[in-house]
Image (cartoon, rainbow, N blue to C red):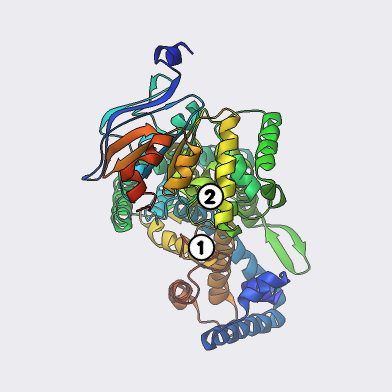
Amino acid sequence: MAEEAAPTESSPLRPGRAARFIPRSPVGWLGLLFVALIVLWLGRNLVADPSEFFSIFFIGLTNGAVYALVALGYTLVYGILQLINFAHGDNFALGGLVASTVIVSWFGLGGDPSTGAVVVGIAVALVIATAFSSALGTTIELVAYRRLRNAPRLAALITAVGMSFILQDIGLVGWGVSFRTIDPLISNDVAFSIGDVGFQWNKLTVLALTVPVLLVLTWLVRSTKQGKAMRATSMDMDAAAMMGINVNRTISFTFALAGGLAGAGGLLYFLHFSSIRYDTGFQLGLIAFTAAVLGGIGNLSGAVLGAILIGLIEQFNEGLPLWSPGSDWTRSIVFGILIAILVFRPEGLLGERTPEGG
Amino acid sequence: MTATEANGGGTILELEDVHTFYGSIHALKGITIEVREREIVTLIGANGAGKSTTLRSINGLNRPRRGTIRFQGQVITDAPAHKIVKMGIAQSPEGRRLFPRMSVLENLQMGAFQRSGKDKDLHSDLDRVYTLFPRLAERKSQMAGTLSGGEQQMVAIGRALMARPKLLMLDEPSMGLAPIFVERIFDIIREINEQGTPILLVEQNAMMALDVAQRGYVLETGTIALADEAKALRQNEQVRKTYLGEE
């Protein structure tokens, strides 16, 4: 199980795929050596205290699931417009703030509410936060990006950064400068154990909400007519229009989808980390963006893989007892990964070098 | 059908004094052409004369600033691209523009995207394409991006046919192909036309184009320089010198 942080090196891949990971340069071999050292480090920690290791692994996996919801939005939008939608992280934060209002102010959850109230409260918050962020995402595209579609990419990128600040200010005005907090709604009692490792209700809930969302998303993109329109539009917008695809509507749909995922992510973040405020989306957005790049931007499975890897790396770094750099280094490590990926493997772990994607 | 009859002689597509711009560049300076039922009409001319722009004006990707485009009697000048496809104009674009990370079959299915048709229709249309291009049946699960140029051209034409077009527009179907493929593509163009589909053909290979077409237009820097029967154009001194490379 020590391979978790480096599945690309050690999982049983088909030969054709595995060949892509055989280094072709000294730098590649250095990278491989580095990964090997990490695997050794993880292995040493695993042997030293298996139950601690797996409990940290489980926290990382849960954080990664939340990141994945946000990372998917970056990758969906990038896939179709080649635009890094920097406002996406702030859309996520606003979704989380809306969810906090629903849960705290409308339902008055907190303290020690009944299970029924919690379930209803979370369900309503999920619907409202998802709908809100979905509508917000579509609106941003309509107002800020649509007219810039044929403009130089830099113009749209700057607009996205501007949009990000606007959303932060909206969050600041609407919800104030202090953190919205909540007592944990879902108990951290152990639901079941395998050996020494306990699986807690609160983390299971996050996974139970995330996994179906990811499955539905995959089905939607792979198998539905709308998904086909998205794939075609992402490969060649003009050709898609010549097939009778309504390109504008397809792009709106993509933003709605990305926004919806961000809204759901905002709710889960609020439940999982118990606090959120107007600027939470800035850093989390960058982390999710790193995850999307790590997996291969534009690639849906890549975004999920990258997000889970980042979640695990953060937790291993902060939690493993032996020789871990510690939480002071977490951000440096995460963005170090971003830089390393951009320099050495810009197409990401699962991305492919494509003529249009570079 | 009354609209068609009112337009006299079964004209299916009409462009009237069409002016189209790329930003501030005046690319089409008043183009007037028509395509009638069952015809192959070709647009020939040098690079940058406005051939592809004419097609982009028709298919809604680059709307004219002035002038009128009518399809089956209906004005489509300002219609969005996806509606124009739905009305029955399909195109095999310049450079093929396949979806590279979709299989041949998926590309062909994309051609029928706008038709909410039943699977049965889809099958008979696929059969038709595979009959025209048996090679595609062998390659149907291969990614389109990995095909040879000639095979890609077949997919592009097949994909346009999957829309069951009332008018088929082909943009440079022979570009970059080996001579043997060029012959084959032009045979297919003739065959599709004989099955009843009118074709607007844009070509740099003027010789082949005038051979297969009934009528032709010669474009020069955004205007129609000549319009005539294809036979007459082939005899025309100017055309022979400029486009057929004869002295």
Give the residue displayed 72% in from the left and 51% down from the top: B138
Instruction: Check disc 1 and report the residue beneath it.
Output: A354
At label 2, the amino acid type is: Leu
- Residue B8 lies in quadrant: top left
Front in this rendered view, residue B182 or B125? B182
Give the residue displayed 70% in from the left and 37% down from the top: B127
Above-or-below relation of A28 to A18: below
Residue farthest to the left, as pictured: B24
Q: Nearer the viewer, mark 1 or mark 2?
A: 2
Q: Position of residue B20 (x, y in %)?
A: 27, 38
Q: Are marks 1 and 2 in contact (CB under 8 Å)?
A: no
Give the residue displayed 75% in from the left and 69% down from the top: A196
- Gap between marks 1 and 2 measured at Cα: 14 Å
Q: Position of residue A244 (x, y in %)?
A: 49, 35
Q: Secondary structure at mark 2?
A: loop
Is residue B162 visible in the rendered image? The answer is: no
Task: Please tell me how crowded label 2 is: few (under 14), some (14-19), or many (20+) other residues with Cα within 10 Å.
Answer: many
Instruction: Check disc 2 and report the residue beneath it.
Output: B98
In the rendered structure, the residue with mark 2 lies on which chain?
B
Counting the numbered discs, the total is: 2
Front in this rendered view, residue B180 or B147? B180
Give the residue displayed 52% in from the left and 38% down from the top: A127
Quarter of the image that includes the C terminus of chain A: bottom left
At label 1, the amino acid type is: Thr
Task: Please tell me how crowded label 1 is: few (under 14), some (14-19), or many (20+) other residues with Cα within 10 Å.
Answer: few
Decide if residue A186 is on the left or right side of residue A293.
Answer: right
Decide if residue A189 is on the left or right side of residue A169.
Answer: right
Q: Position of residue A172 (x, y in %)?
A: 31, 50
- Residue A59 lies in quadrant: bottom right
Q: Secondary structure at mark 1?
A: loop
Front in this rendered view, residue A348 or B81? B81
In the rendered structure, the residue with mark 1 lies on which chain?
A
